[in-house]
Amino acid sequence: MSNIRIAPSILSADFARLGEEVRAIDAAGADYIHVDVMDGHFVPNMTIGPAVVKALRPHSTKPFDVHLMIAPVDPYLEAFAEAGADILSVHPESGPHLHRTVQTIKALGRKAGVVLNPATSLDVLDYVIEHLDLILVMSVNPGFGGQSFITSQLRKIEAIRARIDETGRDIDLEVDGGVDRDTCQLAIDAGANVLVAGTATFRGGPDKYAENIAALRGA
Ligand code: DX5
Ligand code: ZN
């Protein structure tokens, strides 16, 4: 049995039918529901806010993995926690005090993640790793689905896997961007255990979701 978890990104879903889409990926075997929150400022695209997360929450029992691409991020943490986020992941560039932001997420009773852009060094993890539940490596520059996997991130994933193993803690190592049936194996071999997939999940429509998710899991 594979211990790889699949987190479909609803950025590639049909936004006119989001509730149905979330139910469909839940039924198709999604482990997490990955929600991309973009503000048109930190990243060059705009998506959804806490009201939509709250509206989607009853449509799945799976953990909501909320990827916050907004700056400043701190003023919105409570709203996303109350809307039903289980994991809140933040970019270190989205506020001046990463340690404080992580503490705030934990104080809200949610799991805390840190997200590294392709050009962000893993050194930023040095003094927060012991508080983290998840580390997300961006294998594209954030903002849009459908981009190509940046292979230089594989050695970052390997290095972070070693760091996680040193802590002896159970920290998810998630990869996001350009994950498809070919690149998923590269990410898994480098040490990732959670794969975000937008295009590769939703390709072909609802009849294909289960097959798409199973293929990424390496079933
Ligand atoms: C990009 C988002 C990703 C995106 C992935 O900024 O964080 O989650 O939806 O899309 P694909 O899987 O199509 O690269
Ligand atoms: Zn994402």
Image (spheres, rainbow, N blue to C red):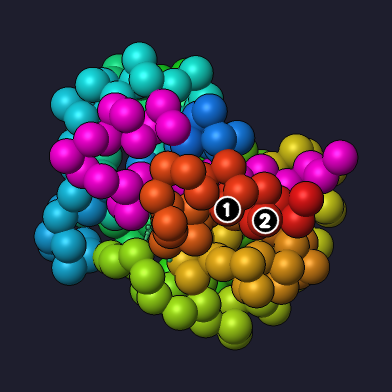
Q: Is mark 2 within 8 Å of ligand 1?
A: no
Determine the residue located farthest toward the bottom in the rendered image. Answer: 152
Q: Which region shows up in magenta?
A: 1-24
Q: Secondary structure at mark 2?
A: helix
Q: Is-magenta flag for residue 19?
A: yes
Residue 159 image position (x, y, % from top left): 73, 70
Residue 191 in which image quadrant:
bottom right
Residue drawn at x 34%, y 65% is: 145
Residue 116 image position (x, y, % from top left): 48, 64
Eyeballing the image, is 31 above or below 37?
A: above
Residue 23 in which image quadrant:
top left
Residue drawn at x 43%, y 58% is: 203
The foreground one among 113 and 65 is 65
Residue drawn at x 32%, y 29% is: 20
The reply to whether the C-beta atoms of the residues labelled 1 and 2 are less than 8 Å apart is yes
> Would you name the residue on which mark 1 appears?
212
Eyeballing the image, is 12 above or below 121?
A: above
Res. 215 mark? 2
The foreground one among 172 and 131 is 172
